[in-house]
Amino acid sequence: MPRKKKYIEEEVIDKALTLFWQYGYEGTSARMLEKAMGINPYSIYASFGNKQGVYIESIKCYRRMLNAITDKLKSSANGKEGVKQYFYDSVAFMLETGPKNGCFAVNTINERGNGDPMIMSEALKCFYDIKALFVNNLKQDGQKDFQTIEKQADNLMMLLTGLLMASKIYSKEKLDHFIENTFENI
Amino acid sequence: MPRKKKYIEEEVIDKALTLFWQYGYEGTSARMLEKAMGINPYSIYASFGNKQGVYIESIKCYRRMLNAITDKLKSSANGKEGVKQYFYDSVAFMLETGPKNGCFAVNTINERGNGDPMIMSEALKCFYDIKALFVNNLKQDGQKDFQTIEKQADNLMMLLTGLLMASKIYSKEKLDHFIENTFENI
DNA sequence: ACTTTATCTAAACAATCGTTTAGATATACA
DNA sequence: TGTATATCTAAACGATTGTTTAGATAAAGT
């Protein structure tokens, strides 16, 4: 009986993600969100509850975006070589989407790491997704025990987050060299 | 002829640093600064110009704090082994000063990386300091050409920033294992 | 002791923050 | 076609943002 929404929630969240990605949580105001999302305050709060809700949906949106590169890793069967390729794909993805904005998940951990458990847990899902795929690929390289694989996957996650954060300030050449060097002796 | 300041600028900046370190630039309000620094708005603006000025002085203060661990690296003469020790010292320093606050320089790059050149350039000095010391230590290990050392130093910087960022979410065991693994094959 | 000058206190500034509300509008079913 | 209901618009909410100001206070040179 009621009237229809004039906007599609997934589409406006995509606009919100773009803003949060560039300016961070606190650096993005409600007014900026209204303008970019193209809807009024009422609609934002009716659809997402509050600013935090908009941000959490933005994380989910980002997680879906990551599928573009994680799907490739998921279907790879060449062990750590697939992980190495994922490192390259990650850098390419970050440089395409916003040259100096880094990874939205890494940014989120950094800005809201202390004191925002809801946002934190949603952002960490991105990392769990990827770590699980790393574990999967590491299993493909001969038989290693569970603990070794876990440790290696954790190390790879730290290397990846470092690389993604570095993508905000280092040149592509240096990032490439870092990847090459990282996988030389693993 | 004028009356004296009732506060010592270095001391109140130390309080400001503590706040910025924990809550970030945008997460720290002028009111929080007044309270923690123990001085009135007038005094803050008279001494430091504005909020950005307080932050920049906080970075300088942090850079001086870092001397506690960089001095040790500076006086070391055992090549990459000294760098490895610096990684351990860095983690220890971050976990001592504020368990989950990470490295203030890394945080700054992350939060104000886009759109705040003044703060950015001040924060980058911390990295230049450390990279120069890395280069110095790498020269101690046999004769390598300039370019090789530069690349290795850049890689070490990315590893370090990744480690420092990881110190916000990973356990000390995982961080230690990461360092151990990193320097196994270098 | 008087003047000078920077610092102190305390209040307030306009602007913006995230969020809410009141009333008009449009849809789908009866 | 009339009614119910969620969404629209537009304005405003109190709180907080970073910053400034006006007047009282204290130190040092004459």
Image (cartoon, coloured by chain):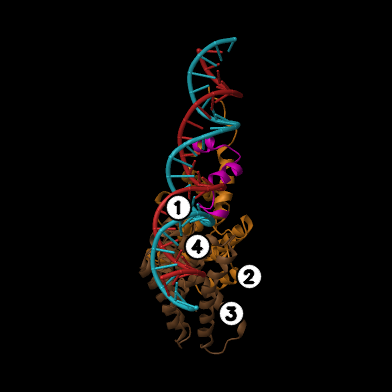
Chain colours: A orange, B brown, C red, D cyan
* Residue, disc 1: A125
Could you tell me if residue B184 is visible in this image? no
Compare residues B110 and B85 and report the one nearer the observer. Answer: B110
Taking the magenta stretch, the answer to whether it contains residue B8 is: no
Q: Chain of mark 4?
A: B
- Residue in view at x 51 percent, y 80 percent: B134
Residue placed most toward the observer, A185 or B51: B51
Respond whether the residues carrying marks 3 and 4 are from the same subunit. yes
Q: Which residues are magenta?
A: A22-46
Q: Which mark is residue B150?
A: 3
Tell me if I can see residue B5 in this picture.
yes
Type of residue at label 4?
A: Tyr
> What whole-number distance in Å separates the C-alpha atoms at marks 3 and 2?
13 Å
Circle nearer the viewer, 3 or 1: 3
The disc at residue A173 is: 2
Do the dots labelled 4 and 2 sit on one chain?
no
Kind of residue sitting beneath label 1: Lys
- Element assignment for label 1: helix
Q: Position of residue A50 (x, y in %)?
A: 47, 41
- 3D distance between C-alphas at marks 4 and 2: 43 Å
State whether discs 3 and 2 lie on one chain. Answer: no
Q: Nearer the viewer, residue B70 or A163?
A: B70
Residue wearing tag 4: B45
Q: Earlier in the sequence, mark 3 or mark 4?
A: 4
Crowding at mark 1 (Cα within 10 Å: few <14, some 14-19, many 20+): some
Q: Chain of mark 2?
A: A
In terms of secondary structure, where does tag 2 sit? helix
